[in-house]
């Protein structure tokens, strides 16, 4: 059992290593400008991206990057500030306004390098006219509790911001904007990462209204009024302000899963990447993974044992209870229940940024004995799942997986080893 867990942990570590900005940024440097180079950015990996850029950039640069509390990296020329995630705070509000001011007044010979990674949506609260920071906080809480996929969340967030949906890049015009992205969204659409402050998001106000109603979002009164109007429009993708801009995805779940798969195969274990873009309710996604693992174990199909099943993406959790835990914990608790009593199956799931939701763990380990050991510890796994209390269940049996902040973020990593 320990050997299997060690292998799964190694796969997670290699997936994270492949997504480290220090490895990727230098390969995607834009052409230096005739004028100034200003660095802007936001996200859980943005400070590490800024440090890598400083080391690789051939000329002068300065700028400002916002990251989550505890994720800062020491930089010499780029200022790093910290703010709250997943619910915005005043520090993020101040930083967003500073970024808007920083790019205002740039000329045609200047370059803005945008370092964007997951988490930037919450780190850059910039309420539209008529809204307050408290309104944006309430919007974020409603979205986090809704179970909506990340693409839906970011389209809706975009309606209420002066910085998201390409608005920051539009403010920087006529300067050229080169965006480097560490993707944490299924499908790796760079415009969806951090709600696309420098890249326009596809989707209309009417579509945002429909989705807000579909997911029954309880929005603040001022936000609902704005959503029903056509105020604060986002720039269109064909707007000339974007004509000379560029973007590159420098790290993603697909690349990280491939690195993990290569190591598994080198260790004598077959590896199957199911998908790097899985979405849906975490507890339901777990049932599909459990059914596939049992099919492999019982019938050696669709893959022969031994094999590790790898997947990525971003599941969601619809809050029903008041427990602790993120989407990976919810996936794992549901998986533990579905695999109760199974032998020869071990799993690890974790957020590649090192923090599952708002807790201190990246994820947890699961095997066929997990549910039994929870019951022996006085925890009813089904009741814990109903209360969204995966953290408490795994804490009780000592199976939390704790890494601390990793310096990158390419979404969730899931590995199920079947022998």
Image (spheres, grey):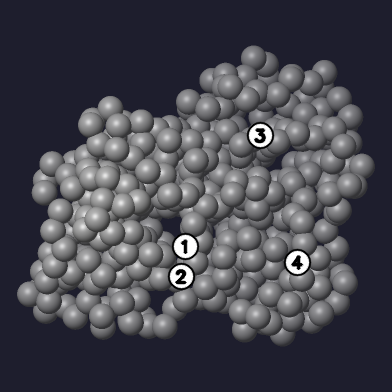
**Please, is residue 313 above or below residue 206 in the view?**
above
Callout 1 touching callout 2 (CB < 8 Å): yes
* Image-based side of 214 in relation to 109, left or right: left
Residue at the left extreme of this rendering = 376
Q: Are marks 4 and 3 in contact (CB under 8 Å)?
A: no
Q: Residues within 10 Å of mark 2 (few under 14, many from 20)?
A: some
How far apart marks 4 and 2 lie (CA) works out to: 25 Å
Choose the circle earlier in sequence order: 4 or 2.
4
Give the percent coordinates (x, y) of residue 341.
Answer: 14, 67
**Residue in the foreground of this view, choosing between 27 and 163:** 27
Disc 1 target residue: 315
Identify which residue is drawn at 87% across, 70% down: 231
Between discs 4 and 3, the one toward the N terminus:
4
Q: Which mark is residue 248?
A: 3
Tell me the CA gap for discs 1 and 3: 24 Å
Pointer 4 local density, CA inside 10 Å: few below 14, some 14–19, many at least 20: many
Residue 68, visible in the rendered structure: no
**Residue 218 appears in the picture as rendered:** yes
Q: CA distance from mark 4 to mark 1?
A: 23 Å
Residue closest to the far right: 240
Q: Which residue position holds label 4?
A: 159
Question: Circles 4 and 1: CB distance less than 8 Å?
Answer: no
Q: Which residue is mark 2?
A: 281
Identity of the residue drawn at 47% across and 76% down: 318
Residue drawn at (29%, 38%) of the image = 270
User: Where is residue 217 drawn, in percent x and y?
Assistant: 62, 81
Question: Under tag 1, what secondary structure?
Answer: loop
Compared across the picture, whether 294 is left or right of 375 comes to right
Q: Residues within 10 Å of mark 3 (few under 14, many from 20)?
A: some
């Amino acid at each position: 059992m320990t050997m299997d867990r060690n292998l799964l942990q190694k796969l997670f570590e290699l997936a994270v290593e492949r997504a480290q900005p220090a490895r990727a940024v230098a390969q995607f440097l834009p052409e230096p400008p005739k004028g100034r180079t200003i660095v802007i950015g936001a996200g859980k990996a943005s400070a590490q991206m800024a440090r890598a850029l400083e080391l690789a950039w051939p000329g002068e640069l300065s700028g400002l990057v916002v990251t989550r509390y505890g994720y800062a990296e020491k930089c010499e020329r780029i200022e790093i500030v910290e703010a709250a995630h997943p619910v915005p705070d005043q520090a993020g509000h101040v930083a967003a306004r500073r970024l808007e001011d920083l790019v205002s007044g740039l000329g045609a010979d200047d370059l803005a390098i945008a370092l964007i990674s997951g988490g930037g949506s919450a780190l850059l609260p910039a309420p539209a006219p008529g809204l307050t920071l408290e309104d944006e906080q309430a919007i974020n809480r409603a979205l986090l509790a809704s179970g909506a996929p990340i693409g839906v969340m970011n389209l809706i967030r975009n309606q209420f911001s002066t910085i998201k949906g390409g608005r920051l890049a539009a403010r920087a015009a006529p300067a050229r904007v080169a965006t480097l992205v560490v993707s944490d969204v299924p499908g790796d659409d760079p415009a969806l990462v951090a709600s696309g402050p420098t890249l326009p998001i596809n989707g209309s106000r009417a579509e945002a209204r429909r989705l807000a109603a579909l997911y029954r979002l309880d929005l603040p009164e001022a936000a609902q009024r704005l959503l029903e109007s056509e105020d604060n429009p986002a720039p269109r993708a064909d707007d000339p302000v974007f004509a000379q801009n560029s973007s590159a995805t420098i790290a993603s779940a697909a690349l990280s899963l491939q690195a993990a798969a290569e190591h598994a195969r080198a260790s004598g274990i077959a590896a199957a990447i199911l998908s790097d873009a899985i979405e849906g309710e975490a507890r339901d996604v777990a049932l599909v993974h459990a059914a596939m693992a049992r099919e492999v174990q019982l019938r050696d199909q669709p893959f022969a044992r031994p094999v590790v099943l790898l997947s990525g993406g971003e599941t969601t959790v619809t809050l029903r209870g008041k427990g602790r835990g993120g989407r990976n914990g919810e996936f794992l608790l549901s998986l533990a229940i579905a695999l109760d009593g199974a032998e020869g199956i071990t799993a690890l799931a974790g957020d590649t940024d090192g923090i599952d939701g708002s807790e201190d763990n990246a994820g947890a380990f699961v095997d066929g004995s997990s549910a039994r050991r929870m019951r022996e510890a006085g925890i009813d796994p089904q009741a814990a799942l109903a209360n969204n209390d995966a953290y408490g269940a795994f804490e009780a049996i000592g199976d939390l997986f704790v890494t601390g902040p990793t310096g990158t973020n390419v979404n969730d990593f899931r590995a199920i080893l079947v022998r």
